[in-house]
Image (tube, grey):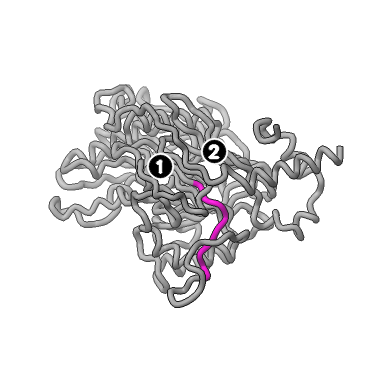
Amino acid sequence: MLVRLLLLSSVLLSCISNGSGGVTSGFVRNEFPSVDIPLDNEVFALPKGYNAPQQVHITQGDYDGKAVIITWVTADEPGSNNVSYGLSEGKYEYTAEGTVHNYTFYNYTSGYIHHCLIDGLQYSTKYYYEVGDGDSSRTFWFQTPPPIDPDSPYKFGIIGDLGQTYNSLSTIEHCIQSGAEAILFVGDLSYADRYEYHDVGVRWDSWGRFNERSSAYHPWMWSAGNHEIEYFPYMGEVTPFRNYLERYPTPYLASESSSPLWYAVRRASAHIIVLSSYSPFVKYTPQWEWLQQELKRVDREKTPWLIVLVHSPLYNSNDAHFMEGESMRVVFESWFCNYKVDIVFAGHVHAYERSYRISNTRYNVSSGPAYPVPDKSAPVYITIGDGGNQEGLALRFRDPQPDYSAFREASYGHATLDIKNRTHAFYHWNRNDDGKRTPTDEFVLHNQYWGMNRRRRKLKKNHLNSVLSSLPLSLIF
């Protein structure tokens, strides 16, 4: 038995160290057209009934996962602003009251947007909820996460740059099939900014109905990308992020943030930090000051997995958006290493790429090595801006492949991060291969805090046993 454990342990370590070994995939997909699905397609269908709630979505509503914010839109009139919810479908013991508003964007007027906070929920519990009036009401459900605990298992889905094409639809459906319990979204939602005038608002509405198949049941942790800025002086619309902020709330106040564009939540065994690539982040700015304090609040004894979401990648070897994340890297990379961030997810580049653990913190313009070097304290950087939007794939990777780049492929897909306990998680990137979900890049992730030898010796043997019992055969043999 001991020999088997030692053998499998060495396999685990080799999986983590070697990854895919600096691979540029030669896969060429027979892609669906990179055009938005027509508005009369059934994926955008309005729900039946007068003033029926639509565009229903949920996100975490507090710091620790015992609350949700439920959002929906009614097209004709405000209607009921209440959410009824309970532990059995059709039997709702509780009611919460929300807020309602609408807004104009150029000559578009939105429907009535409802936001309702439901708090005081129990962990690890399935709740059913109902929104709307009478025969037009609609029922959904959500599952709360397990308690904040270093060994709480949890499975996240990761999606970026989604849009509303047939490729986008494939990504959402595959992510639902993966069993992900919540979605970490790294920005660029609807791509409505590629339209003009009234159609901008129309395409925000269609995307809300399109994505409801997932976001009404599984909380999405939102972050904003460049396509949410929507700075349109020719339309008289010069307030950045307006459509996004009106529709997609975040629990930013719970983490003492001054803006919904950057915030943090704790969920199960993970501490998730969301940053804004397109808000000021240099020294002394609100985002910089907030992140400095939030990193100090992280308690790896309770939430060992430290995850950062940002839109523009700090490391990127694709010609598309090359070095656009460099300024944020210079500001924040040393913090990421000092606090031993486990993984940084980004979007923006419409392709997939994973790095080794590397850093470039010793170069200060006047001295130090000018290239990234291996660094055990550094996070893994993953670019996953491959959700499927109408701009198409970023096909041109730089040649030769940098030493820090472990695997890269220009294809559509999504990822999952399956946390098993405080020491190990399984990561999978799944390609949308001609309409089928195809596991393509996978590795075992050691936790940066509990994976250290000094702390690992304190753990009970059952941690290793629990990992081995759930390890996919493809990683063992």
Packing grade of label 1 (10 A; few <14, some 14-19, many >=20) is many
Report whether 443 appears left or right of 90: right
Viewer-nearest residue: 140 or 18: 18
Residue under the image location 51 percent in, 44 percent down: 407
State yes or no: residue 327 in magenta.
no
Residue 351: give its label.
Answer: 1
Report whether 45 appears left or right of 300: left
Residue named by callout 2 = 441
Number of numbered callouts drawn? 2
Rendered location of residue 283, percent (x, y): 42, 72
Rendered location of residue 87, percent (x, y): 57, 31
Does residue 69 appear in the picture of this structure?
no
State yes or no: residue 361 in magenta.
yes
Residue under the image location 41 percent in, 74 percent down: 284
- Give the spatial CA distance, label 1 vs label 2: 13 Å
Choose top left, top right, bottom left or bottom right for residue 275.
bottom left
Is 309 placed above or below 440 here? below
Q: Amino acid at mark 1?
A: Ala
Rendered location of residue 134, percent (x, y): 37, 25
The residue range painted magenta reads 354-362
Viewer-nearest residue: 175 or 128: 175
Residue 31: give its label.
Answer: none
